[in-house]
Image (spheres, helix red, strand yellow):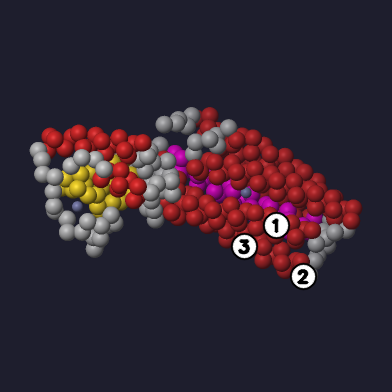
Amino acid sequence: MHQHSSNDNKNIIAVIFINFFVSCFEILGGYLSGSLLLISDALHNLSDSVSIVISYIAIVLAHKKTNQKYTFGYKRAEILAAFINSGILILITLYISFEAILRFISPNKIVPITMLIFAIISFFGNILSTIILHSKSKHSFNIKSTYLHMLSDALASFAVIVSALLILYFKFYAIDSILTIIIAIYILREAIQLLIKSTKILMESSPDTLNLEEIKMAIESIDNVKNVHHVHMWSVSGNDIFLEIHIELNDMLLSQTEIIKQKVYNILKEKKINHINIQFETNSCLSKSILCEDKF
Ligand SMILES: [Zn+2]
Ligand SMILES: [Zn+2]
Ligand SMILES: [Zn+2]
């Protein structure tokens, strides 16, 4: 378990404000200088502020206790937030790439000095957010994704500074579009990975680190276990693993199954499966398939 103190909350709120101001500032800079790179960086920062607000709400929800309505608690909210964040990010990035291609075909005038001044100030804003979030990035799936994100944003702002210099000294106007597209590809790659990861959890997929067939064989090697079937395995938050399993035994007293249960628990705990639901039976299921064949 990890605790989120009110200090963490203050840090996240600070990052939201910094991001919001950097975004407004960059939009102004992009408008004044004519740089798409600044505007794309601004839109991106703005979407970040929205994402962080969602993440923040998710973290608060994740620490709410379970109740009779939400028996799994609210941890899944964090995954839902990651899913929405990455989806929004992908849409914005695709839009910016499209704009950059249009500008590459017909370039427009950029005022490099204005672009440079705004880029330098935004760069320091992004660096500040990254430093604030860095210490919090160890535990949580979503905080970590937010931190990585801030880091790539700081790199992006640095690229804006470099391209302002290239325009200033070499009149290399196309760099604005070229870098916008490169940054977009980089962000897209990260957003797609996050989307895939959160989609897998939302689809209740078995965690990538575990092999169902291996678990089945380990349990079937226990004395008196005839077979293992009808398995469900999933994760609620990305940090926990749930397992539901039918185990067919030789007929015996219920009290005698306790030792078998303990052996099964030991096997599963070793694989970091922390929420286990076993159904012992003699010969009640027709299907002995490892997979669920129920028709709902
Ligand atoms: Zn970002
Ligand atoms: Zn069964
Ligand atoms: Zn089932």
Image: magenta residue range: 33-61
Locate residue 93: give its quadrant. Answer: bottom right
Residue 34 x/y as whole percent: 78, 59
Q: Quadrant of the C terminus?
A: bottom left
Q: How many numbered callouts?
A: 3
Would you say residue 71 is visible in this rendering?
A: no
Q: Contact (CB < 8 A) between labels 2 and 1?
A: no
Helix, strand or loop for disc 1: helix
In the figure, 66 relative to 109: above or below? above
Instruction: Find disc 1 in the rendering and name its residue.
Output: 182
Residue 201 x/y as whole percent: 42, 51
Locate residue 97: give its quadrant. Answer: bottom right
Residue 174 x/y as whole percent: 80, 62
Q: Which mark is residue 105?
A: 2
Residue at position x 74%, y 56% from top? 179
> What is the CA distance from the residue labelled 2 to the residue labelled 3?
17 Å
The chief SS type of the magenta part is helix
Residue at position x 69%, y 65% from top? 99
Tell which circle, 1 or 3, labels the residue nearer the N-terminal end.
Answer: 3
Single out the residue that lies furthest toward the right. 169
Instruction: Find disc 3 in the rendering and name its residue.
Output: 94
Helix, strand or loop for disc 2: helix
Amino acid on which the number 1 mark rests in the picture = Ile
Crowd rating for badge 3 (residues with CA inside 10 Å; few <14, some 14–19, many 20+): some
Tell which circle, 2 or 3, labels the residue nearer the N-terminal end.
Answer: 3
